[in-house]
Amino acid sequence: MSVGARKEPGYDRRMPRTENFEQAFCVVRIDLFQFRDPMPEDWSDYVHVKDVWWTEDEAQAEVDRLNALVEDGETRYHWQQVRVRKRA
């Protein structure tokens, strides 16, 4: 059976769950006002993880809320699918 054919509840073919990981969604802040030409080699001062949510809907709602608060347009929020290692 191909990976894309799996239909288990909670399965997302973009990033399948394993025994050691859970799917989650992080909210990421990107500080556009700091970008310079040429682009920096180290992006650690430009991209920050704000929160981690268990569902895409929760992450999207938080992104929408935060982007509505930003007036300057130089800071943007996005969500990114991630895997979180289960605690032992």
Image (spheres, rainbow, N blue to C red):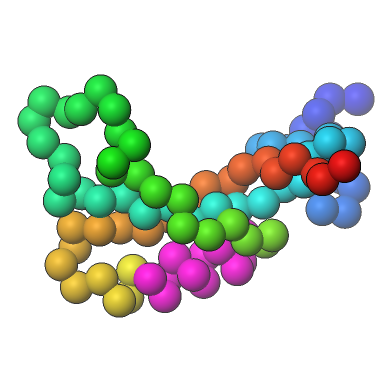
Percent coordinates x, y for residue 81 in the rendering: 59, 46
Q: Quadrant of residue 39?
A: top left
- Based on the picture, tell me whether residue 57 belongs to the magenta stretch: yes
* Range covered by the magenta-colored residues: 56-66
Q: Residue at x 63, y 61 (%)?
A: 53
Q: Quadrant of residue 54?
A: bottom right
Say whether residue 10 is left or right of residue 70. right
Callout count = 0
The answer to whether any part of residue 83 appears in the image is yes
Say whether residue 84 is left or right of residue 38. right
Q: Quadrant of residue 36?
A: top left
Say whether residue 59 is left or right of residue 75. right
Residue furthest to the front: 88
Question: What secondary structure predominates along the stretch shown in magenta?
Answer: helix
The answer to whether any part of residue 6 appears in the image is no
Percent coordinates x, y for residue 21 in the rendering: 78, 40
Q: Residue at x 11, y 26 (%)?
A: 38
- Based on the picture, tell me whether residue 41 belongs to the magenta stretch: no
Percent coordinates x, y for residue 77 in the rendering: 37, 58
Q: Residue at x 8, y 30 (%)?
A: 37
The quarter of the rendered structure image containing the C terminus is top right
The quarter of the rendered structure image containing the N terminus is top right
Percent coordinates x, y for residue 82 in the rendering: 62, 43
Question: Height in image: 15 above or below 54?
Answer: above
